[in-house]
Amino acid sequence: MKKNAAVMNPPVQTRTDSATRRLVILALLSAIGYVSMLFIKIPVISFLSYEPKDIFLVLAGFLYGPLAALACCVVTGVLELLISSTGLIGMIMNIVASAAFACTASFIYKKRRDVTGAMIGLVCSVAAMTVMMLLWNYLISPLYMGVSREQIVPMLTTMFLPFNLLKAGINAMLTLLLYRPFMRVLQMCGYPVGDHLSERKTSNIAVYIVAALLLCVCIGVVYYLNHSA
């Protein structure tokens, strides 16, 4: 009877395996995001550099929702504190920037789990991160840059706005292009991702169009940075 009871009641073990697998995947995506930030830093303007960390945080959110994305943002933000020269203020700003991008995209994607939902979420995440960082740079940048708020104001449109548009646009474009291959790889590894791929015949052409539009935004920002006074 005991043996039969054990066979008839496997859910506890299944939940444990599922929770362990989820933790492993989130830890892996956080680690990849952190490592990518260490090795891929491309100077853009002044002290601001592009890095692709947010791509992997969004993928975590696509898999497990905005709270998972937020947890990964906090983990990578704390890890960045170990090598950052901006201290706690820099850590908070990194977490806010990544969360505005990853949580916005994954929240919208949670409502519509297909490529169209991913596209809408990523476009909104570009706007959310850009607006959020304009506000935070206005409030926080004077604290660690050692300048007055009046000096920060002109930098909002000449430096912070184009940089955040560029960074968010590139990351959104790359996330969109990596979305389906990433889910396919997980599927090949035995991870159940059928609900992420069972979309209503969303044409791949739409993905390429949105990616191309985001690329045009990035090119426009680069042109602006190179030709602005």
Image (cartoon, helix red, strand yellow):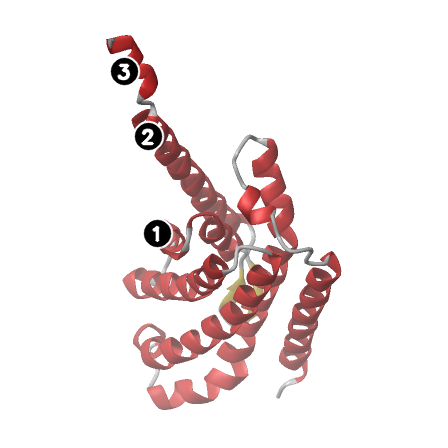
Q: Nearer the viewer, residue 213 or 116?
A: 116
The quadrant of the picture occupied by the N terminus is top left
The quadrant of the picture occupied by the C terminus is bottom right
Left or right of 65, for residue 146: left
Q: Nearer the viewer, residue 71 or 87?
A: 71
Q: Nearer the viewer, residue 63 or 178?
A: 63
Residue that numbered label 3 is attached to:
5
Residue at horizontal 40%, vertical 57%?
A: 66
Category of crowding for the residue at label 1, using alpha-carbon neighbours closer than 10 angstroms: few (below 14), some (14–19), many (at least 20): many
**In terms of sequence position, does the residue under pointer 2 or pointer 1 come before the other?**
2
Q: Is residue 2 above or below residue 226?
A: above
Left or right of 149, for residue 217: right
Give the residue type at disc 2. Thr
Give the residue type at disc 1. Ala
Residue that numbered label 2 is attached to:
16
Nearer mark to the viewer, of 2 and 3:
3
Q: Position of residue 111 (x, y in %)?
A: 47, 61
Task: Identify the residue at the far right of this view.
Answer: 205
Q: Secondary structure at mark 2?
A: helix
Category of crowding for the residue at label 3, using alpha-carbon neighbours closer than 10 angstroms: few (below 14), some (14–19), many (at least 20): few
Q: Secondary structure at mark 1?
A: helix
Alpha-carbon distance for marks 2 and 3? Answer: 18 Å
Residue that numbered label 1 is attached to:
71
Q: Are marks 1 and 3 in contact (CB under 8 Å)?
A: no
Residue at horizontal 49%, vertical 44%?
A: 32
Q: Nearer the viewer, residue 21 or 12?
A: 12
Q: Is residue 77 above or below residue 152?
A: above
Give the residue type at disc 3. Ala
Alpha-carbon distance for marks 1 and 3? Answer: 37 Å
